[in-house]
Amino acid sequence: DAGVIQSPRHEVTEMGQEVTLRCKPISGHDYLFWYRQTMMRGLELLIYFNNNVPIDDSGMPEDRFSAKMPNASFSTLKIQPSEPRDSAVYFCASSSRGTNEKLFFGSGTQLSVL
Amino acid sequence: SQKIEQNSEALNIQEGKTATLTCNYTNYSPAYLQWYRQDPGRGPVFLLLIRENEKEKRKERLKVTFDTTLKQSLFHITASQPADSATYLCALDFLTGANNLFFGTGTRLTVIP
């Protein structure tokens, strides 16, 4: 398996623009997580899905953030409109049994909002 | 609220020595505690998981201990090598059903040849 695949690796955009981050989890994993990493706050959970259903989105900072998982092999995280404070690295991770076993992380998307 | 502290932001050690990294937490003890390695520009990679009823776990040169009385986990790398240089993150799962792993901010380890 190729592991968790995220795209793009880097995204530079201007304030106010829409940004869409993509993730393909490992086949057979029922859980998908979106994390954000910053120097100040470290890794923070934004939202997670179980069997394509959003379970907990309490970490999503504002209504500007939305996430979807239309099928078991694809998820998106959208920011609209983007702001400079959204600049961070966004990681997608998947696991077969949730957080009581290991998570497999993608390589992340480095987002810069100017 | 729960706080997770990793002993230092950066740790430098000589090749061949044992590196010891600390993860302290407040309030409630987690049901599971995980350690991850993160290299620059990459996502975290799972290393070890230890449960609250386990005192110690080993994998090759890695050892993790978990002391619920001290509210602390220690992560050891024996016979350290320059290739072990990376940031190491501890992550706690409180088994609330929320599937939320709480991560520490990490310790950046540099092994000097």
Image (spheres, grey):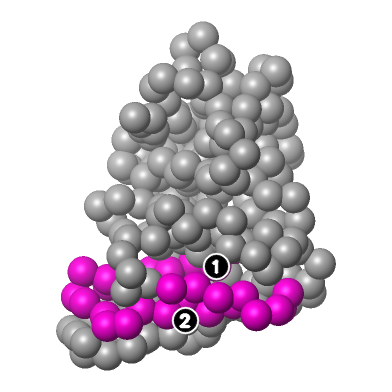
Q: Note whether residue B28 is visible.
A: yes
Contact (CB < 8 A) between labels 1 and 2?
Answer: yes
* Residue at image coords 61%, 33%: B95
- For residue B6, the mark is none
Q: Note whether residue B77 is visible.
A: no
- Residues indicated by labels 1 and 2 sit on the same polypeptide chain: yes
Asked where in the image residue A19 lies, by quadrant, the reply is bottom left
- Residue at mark 1: chain: A
* Residue at image coords 67%, 30%: B50
Return the residue at label 2.
Answer: A21
Asked where in the image residue A93 lies, by quadrant, the reply is bottom right
Q: Quadrant of the N terminus of chain B?
A: top left
* Residue at image coords 25%, 52%: A40
Circle 1 sits in a helix, a strand or a loop, which is it?
strand
Mark 1 burial class by Cα count in 10 Å: few <14, some 14-19, many 20+:
many
Between the C-alphas of marks 1 and 2, the distance is: 9 Å
Residue B109 coordinates in the image, percent (x, y):
42, 45
Residue B36 coordinates in the image, percent (x, y):
56, 48
Magenta highlight range: A66-93
B13 vs A102: above or below: above
Circle 2 sits in a helix, a strand or a loop, which is it?
strand
Q: Relative to the observer, which residue lies in front, A107 or B37?
A: A107
- Residue at mark 2: chain: A
Say what amino acid the circle numbered 1 marks.
Answer: Cys
Q: Relative to the observer, which residue lies in front, B34 or B112?
A: B34
Return the residue at label 1.
Answer: A92
Q: Main secondary structure of the magenta part?
A: strand
| Residue A79 falls within the magenta-colored stretch | yes
Q: Earlier in the sequence, mark 1 or mark 2?
A: 2
A5 vs B70: above or below: below
Report whether B76 appears left or right of A9.
Answer: right
B12 vs A61: above or below: above
